Amino acid sequence: MADADISFETDEETAKADLDPSTHFAFEHKIFQVKDARFALTGPDRIPALRMNVGEHEASIPLESLCQEFNIDPESSDGQMLEQVAQGLKFVRDIRPGDTIPRELLDGTASWSIDESHKVIAKNKVMAAVAAWVSGQGRKKLTPPQIEAMLAKPETKDQIETGLDKIALALGMGKGKRQEVLDLIDRLARELAYIEGLRDRYVHASEIVAKLTQVAALYNTDRIFLDEINRVKVLMRPPIKDFREVFAQVDGQTDDVVTMLKAFNRQLVDIREMRDELHQKMLIWDEAIEHWELDLSYKSKASREAVQFTYRFVAHNFPQSTDWF
């Protein structure tokens, strides 16, 4: 595709904006000012590409060939910004010229939001770990409501007060430094809250297995379709297990709260890496989750299509070397 093939009807707002290239995707070449131009992962291989409307059709130009197609020097500011686009698409669905650069690339924080409830859950889990460390009994596997009820008990509150003093000494802060420990715990909980937000999103992915079982019950006399459903369930086991293992790894680290606080900066890096890994996987799963937002109380074309889509989705995104079915 040559430069002359594109009609450069520019987006005036993007073209005129005075953007800071250190925080925004501030491109200079006119190809990036074409109205509705955006970057997204494209095709079955999810290749980063520039997408735009050309007449009644949508053109898609892989980033790896964009510089050559439009004579953009890879070492220029635009060329270097394209490298950031490729990295940024790991964290957001699409990027438009002029958008803010995802915060994961700027300072390591998350570019997406969470609910206040996720912050509360994360903080409660850390405080429960403090109480368990003092008691020496280890932290039990409890639900968020069970943890909240436990933290309300007087004996647990006493354990936490004792624990804060002991942690201050273990961290070399000295006596009377409870607030400093609490501040550190707050920082840790803010990072872990994003894992809790992802855990909520993961539930929607894992529920697809239960929904497949519901569909199977509707079509219990259709042997061919039942075989297809069972095949999808088998293919889903490894990626769902993979999610659980990452969450279990985070929970295991949180149990050892003193070690986490002693090596806070190292733990911060680890938590963010796991957060980004989970988030990137959830971006892939979101499309499958949307296909299962349907009524499963009766047979329908939509339920059949959801099963077929999920088979293609899992087979493509999570290929297995052995076919167990």
Image (cartoon, grey):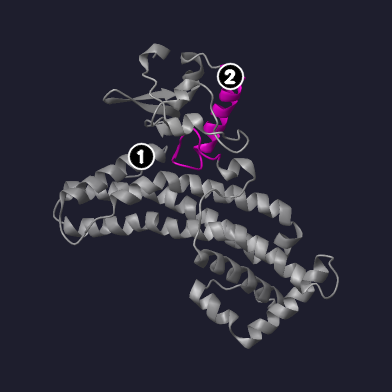
Q: Foreground residue, 325 or 123? A: 123
Lower sequence index among marks 2 and 1: 2
Q: Secondary structure at mark 2?
A: loop
Hey, what amino acid is under mark 2? Pro
Using the image as rendered, state which of residue 62 and residue 166 is in the foreground. Answer: 62
Which amino acid, mark 1? Ala
The one of 275 and 86 positioned closer to us in this rendering: 86
Q: CA distance from mark 2 to mark 1?
A: 35 Å
Range covered by the magenta-colored residues: 73-101
Residue 74 disc label: 2
Residue 119, quarter of the rendered image: bottom right
Q: Is residue 148 above or below residue 289?
A: below
Instruction: Determine whether 163 is above or below 288 in the image.
Output: below
Q: x and y percent of residue 267 in the render?
A: 68, 54
In the image, taking residue 235 as reference, residue 33 lies left or right, namely right
Q: Which mark is residue 315?
A: 1
Dot 1 alpha-carbon crowd within 10 angstroms: few under 14, some 14 to 19, many 20 or more: some
| Magenta-span inclusion, residue 114 | no
